[in-house]
Image (tube, coloured by chain):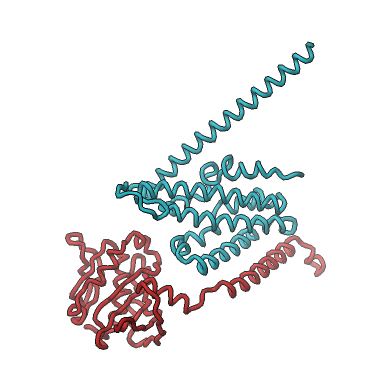
Chain colours: A cyan, B red
Amino acid sequence: MKTDFKKIAMDGVITSNPTFKLVLGTCPTLALTTLAMNGIGMGAAVTFVLICSNVFISLLRNVIPDKVRIPAFVLIIATFVTIVRLVLDKFLPSIYESLGLYLPLIVVNCIILARAESFASKNGPLASAADGLFMGIGFTLALTLMGAFREILGAGSVFGVKLWDFKIEFFASSAGAFFTFGLFIAVFGFISYTLHTKHKIKAYRLKTAETAQTQTAEEV
Amino acid sequence: MKKNNLFKTEAFKCVIVLFLITVLMCGLLAILNDVLSVPQEERLNRAVMKVYGKSVEATAKEIDPARVAEDLGSVDEYYAFTDEGFSYELFKSTGSNGYKNGTVTMWILIKYEDGEAVSVKKAVLDSYEKQTLMSSFGEEFFDRYTSLTKDQLKDGVLFKTGKPNIDNNAFFDGNDVQHAVSGATRSSNAANNAVNVVLLYVWGDLS
């Protein structure tokens, strides 16, 4: 079966965006989006784990018995999370410190286990790698957008660059995280609904035009 | 069950597959841990940079267990270095008796003049256990440890711990205390103890 990479990409970033559409990985989303840089760091770490664990699980999908698939998946995911921790601690200690406890908690991130269970265990390694990549990009974009929004309003800066002295501290607080998350889900839902509706109308018009053409041709 | 049948059961296959995956993952991690682990010198350098603000060559010193006030916490690491004519001692200490008996680990830098400890130059948070509110304590909280004068320190200072007094937000239940660092929660008890254990180590019994 031919892999539809365009669909995988659209699913990961927009149609099934893990943060705004599937509402997965909410814990790091709420806790780490005080800064845009945290979003990029966490997103990159999750993307790496998603790609590697998806590929590994996909390769072993015919070997792992169904009854022990969850512990096997968790074992594989935990290994790659440990590798991410080692890499960040060695090369990017500041990001390692700022992500803190949320880095080992990637092991229990619903996005990774959900993709392993619903995609990687049923598809080939290439498609699984693509799924991991685009789901990771979707997650990174979501966290970075939320982080930038909260950093601009809550700290008056973006990516650590000071913009102005004005700040609304509510957006840097936990309550602000929930508010921002809800706001982004609503905006994202509206945009994706509008795009979906436009796409459906376009497809309907095309189909109607085709039917009309066929009828005209038959009449002639 | 016959021996041959055991090897054909699904349970046996599950155990073997999980075992093999575990071995594979352990092997991978063992190799990568060797390649990616951060050496102790590098960790020390990072700690010195974090606490002192610039890179200097520090030497590890042996911890004397007899000087550690174990009821307050522990001294985990102990280093010394000299810079611009002054001597410094750097401690990594863990203070106990925090919220839900949790701990707070801090880096404490002690400055020496003429061979005598004169001030807490810097106190930096390293990690904490069960003290969720510690993350909301800003730099000003830790800077208060460095605000005491040489005479106050020589008098023998322990930072007060105990239940917070609502009236003036200071701590009143401590013993052997002359000065207090106030705090709003029990979490600051553990932070105070992390500093106290170092002060006791440096100046000895203050009672």
Give percent across and percent down for residue A80: 60, 62
Determine the residue positioned at 65% across, 71% down: B27
* Of B37 and B101, the residue lying toward us: B37
In this rendered view, identify the residue nearer to me: A176 or B19: A176
Give the total number of marks visible in the rendering: 0
Q: Residue B13: where, in percent of width, then height?
A: 74, 63
Whether residue A64 sits left or right of residue B167 in the image: it is right
Dividing the picture into quadrants, the one containing residue B17 is: bottom right
Which of the pair A9/B98 is nearer the observer? A9
Residue drawn at (26%, 71%), measured in percent from left and top? Answer: B145
* Image quarter hosting the N terminus of chain B: bottom right
Corner quadrant of residue B132: bottom left
Residue B181 screen position, x and y as percent = 23, 69
Task: From the viewer's perspective, tell me whether residue B102 is left or right of residue B42.
Answer: left
When the figure is inspected, residue A71 is found, relative to residue B126, above or below; the finding is above
Q: Residue at x 39, y 69 (%)?
A: B126
Task: Give the residue at the far top of this rendering.
Answer: A219
